[in-house]
Image (cartoon, rainbow, N blue to C red):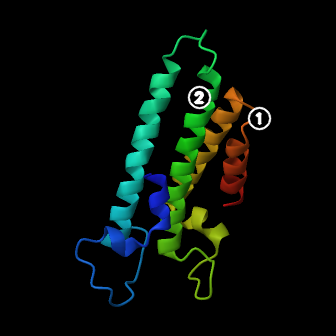
Amino acid sequence: LHSFGEALPPYVFDQTSSFEGDEQVTESRLPTEVEDKISFIRKGEEAYAQALELVTRIDDVEEDKTFLLAATGTDLGINLLSQAKTIAVALGDGSGGDAKTAVADLTAKSDRVKDLVLRSINAFSQALDHNPNDAGAWCGLGSALVF
């Protein structure tokens, strides 16, 4: 649920949205509604991290353990990438007509985006370590690598 928050417009998360004007956005200060949106998505990151921790404690004889590790790792990676994409859109991700910066430049310009993308790559890679046939993890890893 929280990862899909990326698909919602930022004004949904703004408690005082007026729908007026284009704010000048810098890395150090994103609009409040964007920070609120990221905060909402981050709740999913916390839940997936807790789920991953719980799954690692399952006895190794449990036949579904590798599947569960891969699934939770993939979900964590998707959430991290969703946070990065939300920030990228707020910074002008290079897609669309009035782009402020190219997508490739975002990881160089934004430590926050770079960290989230690298963490998502790590989560997808760990998921693939547990289940090399996990299509979702491969798709996520590809998406993160080209981000």
Instruction: Name the residue located 64 percent from the left edge and 41 percent from the top edge.
Output: 124
Can you see residue 111?
no
Residue 115: x %, y % from top left? 53, 51
The C terminus lies in quadrant: bottom right
Q: Secondary structure at mark 2?
A: helix
Q: Amino acid at mark 1?
A: Asn
Question: Observer-nearest residue: 98 or 63?
Answer: 63
Q: Is residue 109 left or right of residue 53?
A: right
Residue under pointer 2: 69
Residue 86: x %, y % from top left? 49, 65
Tell me if label 2 and label 1 are in contact, CB under 8 Å: no
Q: Residue furthest bottom?
A: 21
Q: Is residue 3 left or right of residue 128?
A: left
Q: Where 90 falls versus 133 (above or below)?
A: below
Residue 65: x %, y % from top left? 60, 21
Q: CA distance from mark 2 to mark 1?
A: 13 Å
Residue 5 badge: none
Q: Secondary structure at mark 1?
A: loop
Q: Amino acid at mark 2?
A: Leu
Q: Residue furthest left?
A: 16
Hey, which quadrant is residue 37 in on the image? bottom left
Which tag, 2 or 1, sits closer to the chain's start? 2
Instruction: Name the residue located 39 percent from the left edge and 87 percent from the top edge.
Output: 22
Hey, which quadrant is residue 119 in on the image? top right
Instruction: Name the residue located 63 percent from the left edge and 32 percent from the top edge.
Output: 70
Residue 133: x %, y % from top left? 77, 35
Instruction: Name the residue located 59 percent from the left edge and 83 percent from the top edge.
Output: 99
Can you see residue 27?
yes
Residue under pointer 1: 133
